[in-house]
Image: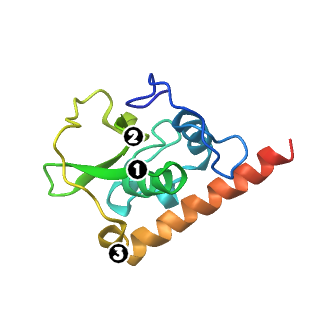
Amino acid sequence: MSFYGSEQQFPPVETGLPGISTPQTLYRALLVCWCAESCAPRMRAGWSEEDPSRGQCSVTAFLAQDLFGGEVYGIPRPDGSFHCYNVVDGRVFDLSSEQFHGEPLDYSCNPLQRREEHFASREKYERYLLLRQRLLDWAGKEANV
């Protein structure tokens, strides 16, 4: 498993979470933390452990922004929604890109996404908080290893 942008060299940053210092290390943690409850409800029926990034884009992108800064952008989708991804210091990465199973995505010239707009949906904000807590719990276990 990998994600769009995973081949890039990211300088490690201090995130305050043991074991997480780059998008690659965050991705490995998210493989354990993503769950059906953090998946978008409209996509939940298709979520599985074999497709863990399914329906996780916005909550994941804003969580990555918390840790690494940068901006969140959205690729317009045919249903009118946006697929969210991160840009940090000019580096594009999309931790939940695997859910598209090789479908080409255009990461250029997309609109900026604001958490205030996304989190105006209480349901989405609660999914973000759940994923954040699962990541904190994972990091706590890593600190004790």
Point out the image quarter for the C terminus: top right
- Is the residue marked by circle 2 packed among few (<14), some (14-19), or many (20+) residues within 10 Å? few
Where does the image place residue 115, in percent across and percent down from the top left? 36, 66
> Which element is circle 1 on?
loop
> Mark 2–mark 1 contact, CB under 8 Å?
yes
According to the image, label 1 marks what residue?
Answer: 70
Q: Earlier in the sequence, mark 3 or mark 2?
A: 2
Q: CA distance from mark 2 to mark 1?
A: 7 Å
Position above or below: 37 against 75 = below
Applied colour scheme: rainbow
Where does the image place residue 102, in percent across and percent down from the top left? 29, 26
> Which element is circle 3 on?
loop
Q: Earlier in the sequence, mark 2 or mark 1?
A: 1
Question: Residue at position x 15%, y 54% from top?
Answer: 79
Question: Residue at position x 34%, y 77% from top?
Answer: 120
Question: Residue at position x 34%, y 52% from top?
Answer: 72
Question: Which of 128 and 102 lies nearest the eye of the viewer?
Answer: 128
